[in-house]
Image (cartoon, grey):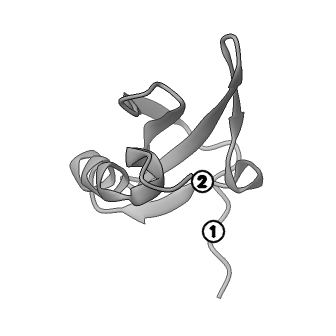
Amino acid sequence: MDKPSLHGQEYRTASTLYSVDGKRAAAVLEFHSGETYLDEQEWVEGTTFKNRHSGDLVGPFASPEDAEKFIAATSRFRGDLK
């Protein structure tokens, strides 16, 4: 089953988390519909980050707190995977 499109829906950035080494970031996006998604990014150079997952969002999560717990627990975000 396809996920419903989020295109054009209003959202707020609840928080942005950065990995300890600063090479990964995840914006926690809370949509007007009540769903929460992650927008994951990786550092390229300077102040430039590129989106992971071809720009697709990760989720939905029940809350911003659940999204934060999920991303903080992943090996990639923690830097355990090279």
Asked whether the residues under the numbered discs 2 and 1 touch, taking CB atoms below 8 Å apart as contact, a structural biologist would say no
Rendered location of residue 15, percent (x, y): 35, 29
Instruction: Name which residue lies at 45% across and 40% down.
Output: 29
Is 14 left, or right, of 59 in this rendering?
A: left
Residue 27, compared with residue 45, is above or below; it is below
Quarter of the N terminus within the rendering: bottom right
Disc 1: which residue: 4
Residue 45, compared with residue 62, is above or below; it is above
Is 34 left, or right, of 8 in this rendering?
A: left
Viewer-side residue, 17 vs 46: 46
Q: Quadrant of residue 8?
A: top right
Instruction: Name which residue lies at 50% across and 33% down.
Output: 25
Rendered location of residue 61, percent (x, y): 36, 61
Q: Quadrant of residue 18?
A: top left
Q: Quadrant of residue 14?
A: top left
**Extreme residue in the top direction:** 46
Between the C-alphas of marks 2 and 1, the distance is 12 Å
- Total marks drawn? 2
Rendered location of residue 35, percent (x, y): 40, 56
Disc 2: which residue: 57
**Extreme residue in the bottom direction:** 1
Q: Amino acid at mark 1?
A: Pro
Instruction: Name which residue lies at 44% across and 46% down.
Output: 79
